[in-house]
Amino acid sequence: MNRTMRKIYRYFTLVVMGLVVFTSCETTELDLTVSPNDLSPDAADPNLLLNSVQLAYASNMDDISDLGAELTRIDYMNGLDYFNNYPGDTFNQIWGRYYSSDVSDVNDPVDPSIAIGMLTNLQNLETINENGDIDYSFHIGISKVMQAHMLFLLADYIGEAALTQAANAIEFPAPILDDGQTIYNGAFAILDEAEALLSGNPNPQGALDLFYNGDTSKWIRLINTIRLRSYVLTGDTAAFNAIINGGNYIQDAEDDFQFAYGTSELQPDDRHPDYANDYTPSGANIYQSNWLMELMLDNNDPRIRYYFYRQNETTPGADAPPNGETLSCSLAIPPPHYLNGGFTYCSVENGYWGRSHGNAEGAPPDNFFRTAVGVYPTGGLFDDDRFANVGLSLGGGGAGIEPIFLSSYVDFWRGIMATSAADRATFLRSGLEKSIAKVQSFGALDGSRDTSFEPSATDVTDYIDGIVADFNAATGDDQENLFAEQYFTTLFGGGTEAYNYYRLTGYPTTVLPNWQENPGPFPRTFLYPQDEVINNPNLTQRSDLTNQVFWDTNPASPAFPPAN
C-alpha cells in the first residue's frame, strides 16, 4: 500500500476516534450522531464540520453501493419479492445523512454542534466562511463535490430529490421534490462551483481530507470524472469526449477515489463493514453471490482469490453430497425457470458456497462453511487453499477500501461510449489491466498468504487476451453480455454504477433469475424515504417500483430488463 494510503488510514483513525460511530444490525456504519441542541453555525469547528460531511458521504456510498450490487447480482439479494424487499425505509438513512440534522439516540461527546446532514454542515461552512476572516474555500469546495455526486445518485436511485426548496425549513417546511433532470442540472452547476473554489488551490486550513490528503488537483480530476459518469447515463457523447480530450480525469490508480478503512476493532470499529461482519469468532455472516462466483470460476478470473475467501473445499450439491442441515437447497429440485435456463440454483463448485439471487431461506449453521469476503476490497484473507476458518484480525484486519471512482471504471465508460467494437475492445483490455493490477496489490495486506497461489503475469495476460479475443469473436447480445459481465466483475465492492448500467442497457442478460419465478417488476427506482413521506405533506408514497428515471427510456416494466 502506498504512502498516501497509509496516511489516509492514519487520518481516518484520528478522526473517528473523536467521533461517535455505531453498528447497525446489518453493517458497521460510519454515522455521526447528532445533538438535539446544535450550537449556532459560527460556533462550530469547520474541520469537524468537514469531517462530518466526509463520513456521512462515505456511509451513504457504502449503502448505495450495496443496493446497486444486490440488484445486479454482484452481491447476493435476500428476499423473494422486490417490492417487499425494498420497502419505504430503504433510503431513510441515506436521505437523512444528506439532508437532515435530526436528533440521534446518543449525543456526540466531542462536539455537540456536529450534525449528521451533509447539506446542513455545508451550509454551516458557508456561513462561517462568509462571516469570518479565514478562507474555507477548500472545505466548501470538496464538500460541494460530494454534495453533487450524492444529488446525482438520489436522482438515479429515487428519480427525484429536494433541491430548489431544500434546506430552507422556514420558507419551505415541506419541500417539493424536483424531477431528475432538474437535479442533474443542479448537480452539474454545483460541480462548476466546486471547481471554481478549488482551482485556486486554497489552503486546507488544517482540514483532514480523508480521500486525497489535501491535493486539490486530484479533486478537480474527480469533478471531471463525476461529469463523465453522468454523461454516460444521459448519452452526451460530445461533453464526454470533451473531458476525455482534456485529459484531466481519473486515469491512473494513484488518483482513484476511494474511502480507506482501518484495523481498530473497538472504540471505534473503523474496519471495512463487510470485514467486520464476516471475520468474527462465530464465523462469516454475509452470503456471496453465486452468479458472480460461478462466472469468475468458469472464466478462471485471476481476481477470484482476492475477492472471495473459501472456508470449505467443496460445496454440497455440487462436488460434495447434498447436506440438508447446512445447505438445504442442495436437496431441492430446481424450479422450471432455473432448469430451463440452465442456471445454477443452489451450489457452485470448489467450495464457492454462496446463495443465488433472491434466496430467502433461513440461515442454517453454515457460518464456518460459507464463502467470506476476501482481501480485496475488504482487507480480509487471500484465498490460498488453506480452507481455514475466518476469525478476528485475520488477513488485512479490515484495512480495505470503499471503491467509489476507480481508473478501471473510467476505461469501461470509455468502452460504453465508443463508436466501434475495436475501440470497445481496447478499453475493455485497459479496464481489465487496471482492475487486476489494483486487486493484486491488495494481496500484500494478508501477510499470512501463500504467494505461490497468486496468479502470475502470464496468467493475467492469458486471461485478458482470452476475454478480448472472445469479445472480438462475438456479436450482438453475446458481445454486449461479455462486456457487461466484465464491467460488473470489475465493480465488485463498489457496485453503484452497475444498477445504472443495468437499467440503461438491460445487460448482462446472463444474470441469475430471481429465486421466485414471479418476484414482481424489477425496481426501476426505489420508494421515497418513508421518514420524508411521513413528515412532508407534499409527498405521497409510491405504490410500486416501476417509475423510470429520466435517462431510462427503455420499455416499461415488466418487459424490461429482459433477464427479470
Image (cartoon, rainbow, N blue to C red):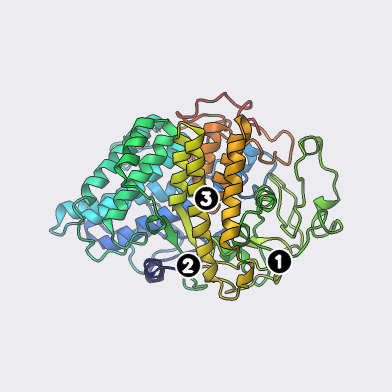
Q: Secondary structure at mark 1?
A: loop
- 1 or 2: tag closer to the N-terminus: 2
Q: Which residue is mark 3?
A: 432
Q: Position of residue 328 (x, y in %)?
A: 82, 53
Kindly identify which numbered label has been placed on residue 271. none
Mark 1 vs mark 2: in front: 1
Tell me the amino acid under the disc marked 2: Asp
Q: Which residue is mark 1?
A: 311
Would you say 122 lies left or right of 74 here?
left
**CA distance separating discs 3 and 2:** 30 Å
Tell me the amino acid under the disc marked 3: Leu
- 1 or 3: tag closer to the N-terminus: 1
Would you say 144 lies left or right of 544 here?
left
Tell me the amino acid under the disc marked 1: Gln
Q: Which residue is mark 2?
A: 270
Would you say 491 lies left or right of 180 here?
right
Residue drawn at (53%, 42%) of the image: 498
> CB of mark 1 within 8 Å of CB of mark 2?
no
Q: Position of residue 147 (x, y in %)?
A: 35, 46
Residue drawn at (62%, 57%) of the image: 304
Q: Position of residue 512 (x, y in %)?
A: 69, 41
